[in-house]
C-alpha cells in the first residue's frame, strides 16, 4: 500500500500548516489537494489520500484546523464539531489551500494538472476553491451548504457555482426519505451556467449516507477517478 506521511510548512503569520501527503509508487500523473470533512483529517480522509496516490496522483491534505491545534474530531459530539467549523474563516481556508497547491507546484506539478476534492465540509470548500482559483478539475462529494452557506465566511454553493473555472463533478445522495433533493437540482442548474464542463450525479440513499452501499461507493469512486483522468491532462 502507498505510504502516507505528514509534513509541516511554515506560514507567513508565524503558524505552521500540517499536510498529510502520499506519493505514487510509479510515475506521477499530477497532483490533487484533498480537503477534509467536518471531523478533520480522519481515517477516511487518509484513505482517500492513499487511494488517489495509488492511482498515480501526488496527493496532499491540508489540516484546516491547525490554528486550533485540532486534527481529528472523529469521537467528538456534533455540537463540538459545528463549533470547530464555525471558527473557520474563509481567507484562512483559501490561504491553507493555496499552500497545499504551492506544495504541489514545488514538486513540479503545473496548475493544469492540479485537482481538488473534498467530502462533506471539504466538498463545499472544493467547489468554492474551484470558483476562485485556476486549476485543472474539481470534485465535490456530499458538499453541504448548497443553498445556505456552510459557515459565515463562505458563500453557498449555489452562489459560487456559476463562477467555476474548471471542470467540476458533484456527487450527492437523495434525501433521507428517498426523494430527490431540490437544492441539488438548483446546484446542478447553477453549475451548468458556468463556462466549464460540469456534472452532478445523485445516488439512492442507503442509511445515513449513500456510500453506506459498497456498490454505490465503488461507482462514485470510479467516477471520481475518471473525472480526474479525463480533465487533468
Image (cartoon, rainbow, N blue to C red):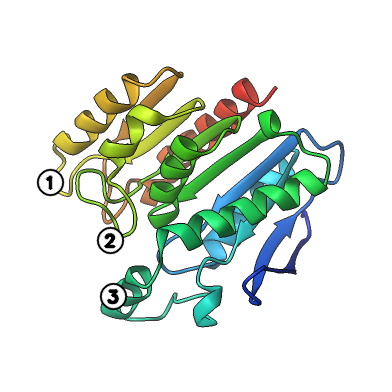
SS for callout 2? loop
User: Which mark sits nearer the N-terminus, 3 or 1?
Assistant: 3
Front residue (pair 24, 204) = 24
Q: CA distance from mark 3 to mark 1?
A: 22 Å
Q: Does 19 appear above or below 75?
A: above
Residues under labels 3 and 2: Cα distance? 18 Å
The quadrant where residue 75 appears = bottom left
Circles 3 and 2, Cβ within 8 Å, touching? The answer is: no
Which one is earlier in the sequence, the residue at label 3 or at label 2?
3
Q: Position of residue 171 (x, y in %)?
A: 38, 37
Q: Secondary structure at mark 1?
A: loop
Disc number lying in front (2 or 1): 2
Image coordinates of residue 210 in percent, x first then y, are: 33, 46
Answer few, some or many: residues within 10 Å of disc 2's Cα (few below 14, many 20 plus, some between 14 and 19): some
Q: How many marks?
A: 3
The circle drawn on residue 177 is 1
Q: Quadrant of the C terminus?
A: top right
Q: Cβ–Cβ below 8 Å for labels 2 and 1?
A: no
The circle on residue 78 is: 3
Q: Which mark is residue 2?
A: none
Q: Is residue 119 above or below residue 180?
A: below
In this figure, which residue is indicated by the disc labeled 2? 152
Amino acid at each position: 500500500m502507498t505510504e502516507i506521511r505528514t509534513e509541516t510548512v511554515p506560514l507567513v503569520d508565524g503558524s505552521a500548516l500540517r499536510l498529510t501527503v502520499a506519493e505514487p509508487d510509479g510515475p506521477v500523473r499530477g497532483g490533487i489537494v484533498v480537503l477534509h470533512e467536518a471531523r478533520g483529517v480522519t481515517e477516511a480522509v487518509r484513505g482517500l489520500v492513499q487511494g488517489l496516490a495509488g492511482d498515480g496522483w501526488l496527493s496532499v491534505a491540508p489540516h484546516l484546523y491547525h490554528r486550533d491545534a485540532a486534527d481529528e474530531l472523529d469521537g467528538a459530539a456534533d455540537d463540538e464539531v459545528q463549533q470547530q467549523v464555525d471558527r473557520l474563516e474563509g481567507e484562512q481556508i483559501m490561504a491553507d489551500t493555496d499552500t497545499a497547491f504551492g506544495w504541489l507546484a514545488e514538486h513540479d506539478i503545473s496548475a493544469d494538472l492540479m485537482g481538488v476534492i473534498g467530502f462533506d465540509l471539504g466538498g463545499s470548500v472544493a467547489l468554492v476553491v474551484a470558483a476562485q482559483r485556476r486549476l485543472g478539475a474539481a470534485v465535490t462529494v456530499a458538499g453541504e451548504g448548497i443553498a445556505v452557506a456552510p459557515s459565515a465566511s463562505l458563500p453557498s454553493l449555489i452562489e459560487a457555482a456559476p463562477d467555476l473555472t474548471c471542470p467540476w463533478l458533484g456527487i450527492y445522495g437523495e434525501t433521507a426519505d428517498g426523494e430527490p433533493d431540490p437544492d441539488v437540482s438548483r446546484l446542478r442548474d447553477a453549475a451548468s451556467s458556468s463556462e466549464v464542463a460540469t456534472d452532478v450525479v445523485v445516488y439512492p440513499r442507503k442509511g445515513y449516507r449513500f456510500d453506506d452501499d459498497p456498490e454505490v461507493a465503488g461507482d462514485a469512486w470510479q467516477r471520481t477517478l475518471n473525472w480526474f483522468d479525463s480533465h487533468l491532462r
